[in-house]
Image (tube, rainbow, N blue to C red):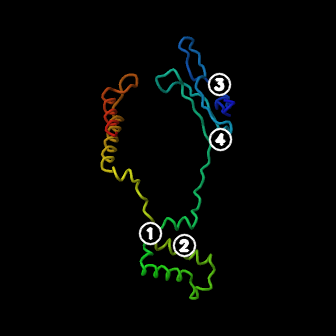
Amino acid sequence: MELHDLAALSSFFKKPFNGTWLHPCSKLQKQLDHIMISRCDVKRFTDAGACCGQLIDSDHSAVFCKLRFTVRLRRKIEPRAQLARLDTAPLLNQDQAVQFATDVVASLGRSDASAVSYSTLAKAVEKTAAETLPKLERPAPLWFAAKEGVMRAHIVNRNATFSAHQRQPRGDGGHLLPLDIERRAHACSSMI
């Protein structure tokens, strides 16, 4: 751990109960399960330890940690990036290009467009483009478009199998029923 600058997170938070595994003979709790993190990220966590009790049929208890993080607000998109998202194909038509230029001059609000600074003209072009030009359509991935008919059928089949599996109870001991295993194998083989 020292070599790779790692740390066991549970060692930084004092708890009255640290056991994650129950020894079958002595019935004593031992800490075998850890959450490993980079040592520089310790300050991002507010709590860690072992959960009391067992959630599943196992001799191990669950381990948990609480992570503190901040949400970064979206950056404002640069005006040039906004222009790159617009479809400029209509400007190839001469009439629409003239109409666009007329709209730019109108948004300047001056009759003498020759005495305008570059930044004012750029803002007018950006504003007019945002108002008049349509946005580019996001292209679908080519691999999906080529196999869309087959893939849609497989996706519907997979979703139906998953829904049926979620509605059906499991067998004793939390294991899958043989019917569930057969459905899952069929769904996986049909996707290939």
Q: Are marks 2 and 4 in contact (CB under 8 Å)?
A: no
Q: Is residue 158 left or right of residue 109?
A: left
Asked which secondary structure carries label 1, the reply is loop
Q: Earlier in the sequence, mark 3 or mark 4?
A: 3
Q: Locate residue 39, reporting x and y percent.
A: 68, 36
| Of labels 3 and 1, the one closer to you | 1
Label 1 and label 4: CA atoms lie apart by 43 Å
Q: Earlier in the sequence, mark 1 or mark 2?
A: 2
Q: Locate residue 136, reporting x and y percent.
A: 44, 64
Q: Residue at x 59, y 28 (%)?
A: 50
| Of labels 2 and 3, the one closer to you | 2
Asked which secondary structure carries label 4, the reply is helix
- The residue that mark 2 highlights is 126
- The residue that mark 1 highlights is 134
Asked which secondary structure carries label 3, the reply is loop
| Of labels 1 and 4, the one closer to you | 1
The residue most toward the bottom is 111
Q: Residue at x 65, y 41 (%)?
A: 44
Q: Quadrant of the N terminus?
A: top right
- The residue that mark 3 highlights is 16
Query: What kind of residue is marked 2?
Result: Glu
Q: Earlier in the sequence, mark 2 or mark 4?
A: 4
Mark 4: few/some/many CA within 10 Å (<14, 14-19, 20+) = few
Q: Quadrant of the C terminus?
A: top left
| Of labels 3 and 4, the one closer to you | 4
Q: Quick one: 130 or 143, which is closer to the camera?
A: 143
Query: What kind of residue is marked 1?
Result: Pro
Mark 1: few/some/many CA within 10 Å (<14, 14-19, 20+) = some
- The residue that mark 4 highlights is 44
Q: Residue at x 54, y 25 (%)?
A: 61
